[in-house]
Image (cartoon, rainbow, N blue to C red):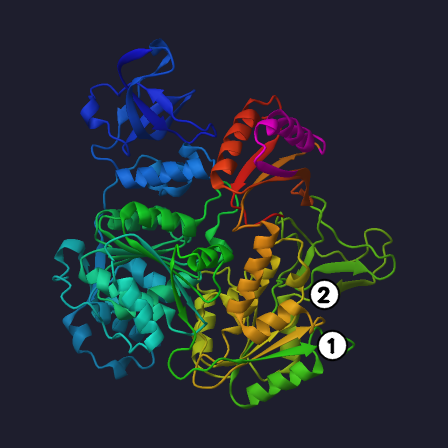
């Protein structure tokens, strides 16, 4: 039916469409632009939505179309390019556009608050702070650290100081204020000048020939879309290339977006960038308050933030003057959201760079097979750094066969001797075990009972600090039982190794050496990881024990030994990505050894020392190893030589998910002969969080075939009578099949 004028609005609804509304009272067509927020009636509620488009037509009778209540923004909060990014992502990942916007916009934008920067206050040194003798603060190292930090940057906000120093910053600032060494000034009085000086104290380093070639290629045509895969062995100086490429972009008055895979890397990256650049830097990650995220988002949108550093959700940050996107550790699975809106931050970075006609750099020592295949096919510019920067050398690898050996809580006698020799030389040691907790099993020696989670097909993990049984799948917890639940025996034993047990074993073996554990449990406190890294950076002999968190780009120049307790888990994974992920993890964690002046050693304990995968990885390195995996994938017609989607369905009734998926696929599969359907079948973990789970894999030789099939499938799922009884999801380009 034709009428004067309608607006299409995306609201946070599970329905995969926008909704038509009449304009708010008093608004004409010229003021209602895509990207502006409106308040609308939705059922019995008032909701905040975003205008996605306008039209003079609607599929619904005009009498049924309600008017929006009010227009919130005179100017759109999202520009055309960003709206296009959201709409493309919603379409490609098959997720409702309203919920895409809901999950990735700052909370205050979603709530309808004014998109205006609040008055920001900055700390700067007083005359007394500038002239003070630093020796007078030698007994107050925290005060001295803050004073020097504020002095080096001229001005800093409390939030920026907290990001670098930690939560105790408030009390230190108060003390310095009372001593009249610092003062707080509003934003408009800060003497920022014109940022004539690009660099701070940390000047650019001299590049080696490989680095120079890569940087020259990135500099060329930096005003148009290019994808650069920068594959550099660990410690090869990829970050220095990032920094010098960023300097070129900043000199042109443009902004740079830098993605990192984990929150834990954000402060480390921020400190490195703070030392190098005399520019405004904004940070985005889930650990910020709503107000901090809002202010950083607005600074980026208004062009005040020159560098934006964040985790995967930062890809949706508005940019006033985009110039470059960098994705560090591009292979990392953390870039793929694993629930809700299941998008890939890396892949959206490439799409957004194409949108904005700017280059994107993907950096890693262990490229994903998807990126490597694109580079080898000539779709990406491919740059390899084969030598470590400075005087650092590649570590020596040793496979330690432990078949038939007596182990002390996972440690062979040979490994203990190797650790002891490195510590005797005043070096640091890193011990890797990718399993947190004390032990993965608690069992009864008398009857064989195992403590299992009643909500999942999984055993509880025993934790000792604090004591508890925890399910690592649904996060259920319970006290540690004192007797067997089957036979009442008190002879309960923990089986297997976790990082807590390994930490205790290492302390018993080396009682005079500090031991630091780094895993998700030990670093829950905001400043815990920062404090540990500070101690490690002191250079004193110590032992680090941890999970894959230790592999995520950390620079430990005094670690000369990396010991991998158990390398066999990834060798026999049922997941076709298992060996790729194992190779990446072992290579990354091994790369922590020998990054300083002293050469490093990597010792890998294994029961499969003659396994071809391990021999290839250790003997030839990741690059030849990855190429062999690519050949195997090609023969098997697996990604990246085909395209996949994973459909999951779950319900409290065990029969309902399989019935739901079977009926739907039977209805539509005849029309899609070019699509291969595997399943429906039980998920590898059939029961999780009291829900029974089924899944099926959709595979085809072209992305477009997968997308067409998914569109038909989702339409049918939404129409199915059991739609509200079953919780279902679509994962395009899945990484996790569990």
Q: Residue at x 43, y 68 (%)?
A: 530
The percent position of residue 85, horizontal first and vertical second, equals 35, 41
Who comes first in sequence, dot 1 or dot 2?
Answer: 1
* Residue 562, placed above or below residue 83: below
Residue 273 visible in rendering: no
Q: Residue at x 41, y 40 (%)?
A: 89
Q: Nearer the viewer, residue 610 or 65?
A: 610
The percent position of residue 452, horizontal first and vertical second, equals 74, 51
Q: Secondary structure at mark 2?
A: loop
Q: Nearer the viewer, residue 156 or 705?
A: 705
10 Å neighbourhood of mark 1: few (<14), some, or many (≥20)?
Answer: few
Q: Which image quadrant: the N terminus?
A: top left
Answer whether residue 489 is magenta in the image. Answer: no
* Residue 133, placed above or below residue 516: below
Residue 353 visible in rendering: yes
Whether residue 386 sits left or right of residue 39 in the image: it is: right
Q: Give me the disc on residue 407.
A: 1
Extent of the magenta region: 654-678
Q: Give me the disc on residue 502.
A: none
Magenta part mainly helix, strand or loop? helix
* Residue 729, placed above or below residue 511: above
The percent position of residue 137, horizontal first and vertical second, equals 29, 79
User: Label 2 belongs to which residue?
Assistant: 496
The percent position of residue 261, horizontal first and vertical second, equals 44, 58
Q: Secondary structure at mark 1?
A: loop
């Amino acid at each position: 039916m034709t009428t004067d004028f309608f607006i299409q609005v995306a609201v946070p609804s599970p329905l995969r469409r926008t909704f038509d509304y009449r304009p708010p009272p008093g608004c004409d067509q010229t003021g209602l632009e895509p990207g502006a927020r409106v308040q609308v009636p939705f059922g019995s509620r008032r909701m905040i939505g975003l205008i996605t488009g306008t039209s003079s037509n609607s599929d619904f009778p005009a009498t049924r179309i309600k008017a929006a209540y009010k227009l919130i923004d005179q100017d759109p909060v999202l520009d055309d390019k960003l709206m296009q990014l959201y709409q493309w992502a919603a379409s490609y990942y098959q997720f409702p556009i309203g919920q895409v916007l809901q999950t990735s916009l700052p909370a205050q934008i979603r709530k309808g608050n004014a998109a205006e920067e609040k008055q920001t206050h900055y700390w700067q040194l007083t005359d007394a702070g500038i002239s003070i003798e630093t020796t007078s603060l030698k007994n107050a190292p925290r005060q001295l650290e803050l004073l020097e930090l504020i002095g080096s940057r001229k001005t800093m906000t409390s939030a920026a100081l907290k990001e670098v120093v930690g939560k105790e910053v408030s009390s230190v600032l108060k003390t310095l204020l009372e001593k009249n060494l610092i003062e707080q000034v509003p934003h408009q009085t800060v003497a920022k000048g014109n940022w004539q000086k690009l660099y701070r104290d940390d000047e650019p380093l001299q590049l080696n020939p490989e680095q120079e070639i890569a940087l020259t290629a990135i500099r060329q045509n930096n005003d148009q879309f290019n994808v650069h895969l920068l594959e550099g062995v660990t410690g090869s100086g990829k970050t220095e290339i990032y920094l010098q490429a960023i300097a070129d972009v900043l000199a042109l008055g443009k902004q740079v977006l830098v993605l990192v895979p984990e929150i834990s890397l954000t402060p480390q990256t921020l400190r490195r960038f703070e030392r190098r650049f005399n520019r405004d830097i904004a940070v985005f990650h889930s650990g910020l308050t709503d107000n901090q995220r809002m202010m950083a988002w607005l600074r980026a949108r208004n062009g005040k933030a020159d560098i934006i550093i964040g985790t995967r959700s930062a890809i949706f940050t508005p940019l006033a003057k985009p110039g470059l996107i960098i994705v560090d550790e591009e292979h990392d699975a953390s870039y793929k959201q694993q629930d809700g809106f299941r998008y890939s931050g890396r892949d959206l970075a490439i799409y957004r760079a194409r949108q904005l006609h700017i280059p994107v750099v993907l950096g890693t020592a262990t490229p994903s097979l998807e990126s490597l295949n694109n580079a080898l096919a000539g779709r990406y510019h491919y740059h390899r750094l084969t030598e470590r920067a400075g005087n650092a050398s590649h570590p020596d690898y040793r496979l330690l066969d432990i078949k038939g050996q007596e182990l002390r809580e996972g440690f062979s006698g040979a490994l203990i001797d190797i650790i002891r020799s490195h510590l005797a030389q005043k070096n640091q040691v890193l011990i890797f075990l990718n399993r947190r907790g004390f032990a993965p099993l608690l069992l009864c020696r008398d009857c064989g009972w195992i403590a299992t989670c009643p909500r999942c097909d999984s055993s509880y993990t025993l934790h000792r600090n604090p004591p508890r049984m925890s399910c690592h799948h649904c996060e259920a917890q319970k006290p540690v039982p004192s007797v067997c639940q089957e036979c009442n025996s008190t002879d309960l034993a923990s089986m297997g190794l976790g990082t807590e047990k390994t930490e205790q074993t290492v302390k018993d073996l080396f009682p005079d050496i500090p031991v630091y554990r780094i895993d998700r449990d030990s670093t829950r406190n905001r400043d815990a990881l920062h404090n540990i890294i500070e101690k490690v950076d002191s250079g004193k002999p110590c032992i680090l024990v941890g999970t894959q968190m230790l592999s995520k780009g950390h620079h430990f120049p005094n670690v000369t030994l990396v010991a991998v307790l158990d390398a066999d888990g990834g060798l026999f994974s049922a997941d076709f990505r298992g060996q790729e992920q194992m190779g990446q993890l072992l290579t990354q964690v091994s790369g922590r050894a020998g990054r300083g002046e002293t050469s490093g050693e990597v010792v890998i304990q294994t029961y499969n020392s003659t396994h071809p995968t391990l021999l290839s990885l250790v003997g030839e390195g990741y690059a030849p190893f990855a190429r062999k995996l690519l050949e195997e994938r090609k023969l098997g017609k697996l990604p990246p030589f085909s395209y996949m989607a994973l459909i999951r369905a779950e319900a409290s009734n065990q029969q309902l998910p399989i019935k739901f998926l079977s009926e739907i696929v039977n209805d539509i599969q005849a029309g899609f002969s070019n699509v291969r359907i595997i399943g429906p079948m039980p998920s590898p973990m059939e029961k999780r969080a009291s829900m029974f789970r089924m899944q099926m894999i959709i595979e085809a030789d072209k992305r477009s075939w997968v997308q067409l099939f998914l569109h038909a499938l989702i339409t049918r799922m939404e129409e199915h009578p059991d739609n509200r009884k079953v919780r279902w999801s679509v994962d395009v380009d899945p990484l996790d099949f569990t």
